[in-house]
């Protein structure tokens, strides 16, 4: 069994048995092969359900707002940054939160992997950095490194930034030559090319809002897309309405997005909505020297005023 | 916000931000003129425009 899983089960069991927490939020294996899903357990006997592997790409920070009692939660590097956001934005008190940090080796891009195999995947397993996939044709092995999710390739905060327990030793952080190469590439395009790129990007969107629902940042009691009076954006499949939704959803994440990739992971149409938020991450970094969720004592840049803020866009 | 719109292919000169006090009538006129000129130079907008049919 994976050492992380073992350690997580131990910690969870202990926390529940000693009644230090009322529940533990983690991952369990899903009902179909190659799927892990969030689970909340309240009894130490259920600790055996918990797992951690490269399929645990959803962000559990999404399930810790306004908790009843004290909760423990599993956090990868990016998730822990969203938990910092939550504390700063008063969605949860730090005292009610026990963070079980997991130094992360990156998550697997399931869609990419599925393209490599023929037929249905019937079983999945991993050992260290090797992935084992079983199909009707037999067992195949892949190197995890070749199938990392895009955001994991660019991640520079794999170790949890806050934690109360750790499920393993810290991992070495990646050093990237140009962390924003993807954004720069789009910036260098012509106006028309950019426009086409984003129009194509969202053309299959069915407006299920899974991207919004999976995102820990989206916690308004009524989302602007659901409001009908006033109706900020049309509810149809009209392309302009779809694009307006995406533009505004992304902008609401400005200075807050941790590039956790939960939005992309949740999308049933495989739309890379990070294309929008990546630009905001770059701008936050360049304009305010800011990376979201690293410091529990600081409010995000769009929430504060500093006389040194860039203002050259004001006429 | 302007940056993200530009990133998505909306011309930068269509989006303007200014800070004008209610006592700054002349500044208001100047800003409106400048915006109108810039937008006129770009021609009709085609991006993020809802067409009812
Ligand atoms: S999850 Fe995908 S299909 Fe659903 S609204 Fe978001 S981008 Fe559109
Ligand atoms: S917008 Fe996407 S990448 Fe950013 S915090 Fe939300 S779910 Fe994570």
Image: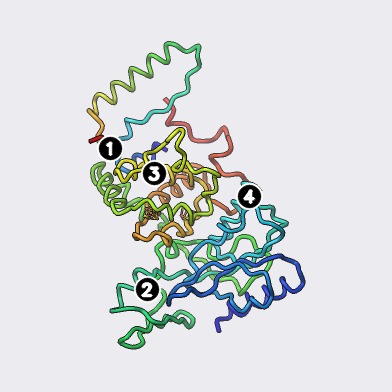
Of the pair A20 and A198, the residue shown nearer to us: A20
Q: Position of residue B34 (x, y in %)?
A: 33, 20
Spatial distance from mark 1 to mark 3, Cα to Cα?
Answer: 14 Å
Q: Select label 4 or label 2 by which is in front.
A: 4
Q: CA distance from mark 2 to mark 1?
A: 37 Å
Q: Which residue is mark 2?
A: A146
Q: Disc 3 and disc 4: Cα gap in Å? A: 24 Å
Residue picked out by circle 1: B47
Q: Chain of mark 4?
A: A
Q: Is mark 1 within 8 Å of ligand 1?
A: no
Which quarter shows the N terminus of chain A? bottom right
Mark closer to the chain start, 3 or 4: 4
**Residue bearing the label numbered 3:** A245
- Residue A198 is tagged as none
Of pointers 4 and 2, the one earlier in the residue sequence: 4
Structural crowding at the residue carrying mark 3, measured as other residues with C-alpha within 10 Å and reported as few (<14), some (14–19) or many (≥20): many
Residue at image x 29%, y 43%?
A238
Reading the image, the residue beneath label 4 is A91
């Amino acid at each position: 069994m994976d050492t992380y899983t073992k350690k997580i089960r131990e910690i969870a069991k202990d926390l529940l048995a000693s009644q230090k927490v009322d529940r533990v939020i983690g991952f369990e294996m899903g009902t179909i092969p190659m799927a892990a899903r969030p689970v909340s357990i309240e009894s130490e006997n259920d600790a055996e359900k918990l797992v951690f592997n490269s399929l645990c790409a959803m962000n559990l920070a999404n399930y810790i707002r306004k908790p009843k009692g004290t909760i423990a939660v599993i956090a990868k590097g990016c998730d822990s940054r969203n938990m910092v956001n939550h504390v700063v934005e008063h969605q949860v008190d730090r005292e009610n939160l026990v963070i079980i940090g997991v130094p992360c080796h990156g998550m697997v891009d399931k869609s990419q992997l599925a393209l490599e195999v023929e037929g249905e995947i019937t079983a999945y397993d991993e050992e260290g950095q090797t992935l084992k996939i079983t199909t009707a044709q037999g067992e195949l092995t892949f190197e995890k490194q070749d199938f990392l999710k895009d955001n994991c390739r660019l991640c520079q905060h794999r170790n949890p930034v806050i934690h109360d327990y750790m499920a393993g030793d810290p991992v070495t952080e990646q050093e990237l030559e140009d962390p924003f190469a993807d954004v720069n590439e789009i910036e260098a395009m012509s106006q028309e090319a950019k426009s086409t790129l984003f129009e194509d990007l969202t053309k299959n969107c069915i407006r299920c809002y899974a991207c919004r629902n999976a995102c820990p940042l989206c916690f308004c009691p009524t989302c602007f897309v659901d409001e009908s009076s006033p109706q900020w954006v049309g509810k149809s499949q009209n392309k302009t309405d779809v694009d307006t939704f995406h533009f505004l959803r992304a902008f609401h994440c400005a200075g807050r997005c941790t590039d956790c990739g939960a939005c992309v992971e949740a999308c049933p149409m495989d739309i890379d909505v990070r294309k929008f938020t990546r630009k905001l991450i770059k701008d936050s970094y360049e304009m305010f020297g800011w990376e979201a969720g690293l410091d529990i004592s600081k409010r995000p840049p769009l929430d504060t005023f500093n006389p040194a803020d860039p203002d050259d866009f004001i006429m | 916000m302007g940056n993200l719109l530009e990133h998505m292919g909306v011309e930068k000169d269509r989006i303007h931000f200014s800070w004008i006090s209610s006592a700054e009538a002349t500044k208001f006129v100047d800003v409106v003129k400048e915006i109108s000129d810039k937008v006129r130079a770009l021609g009709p907008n085609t991006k993020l425009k809802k067409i009812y049919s």
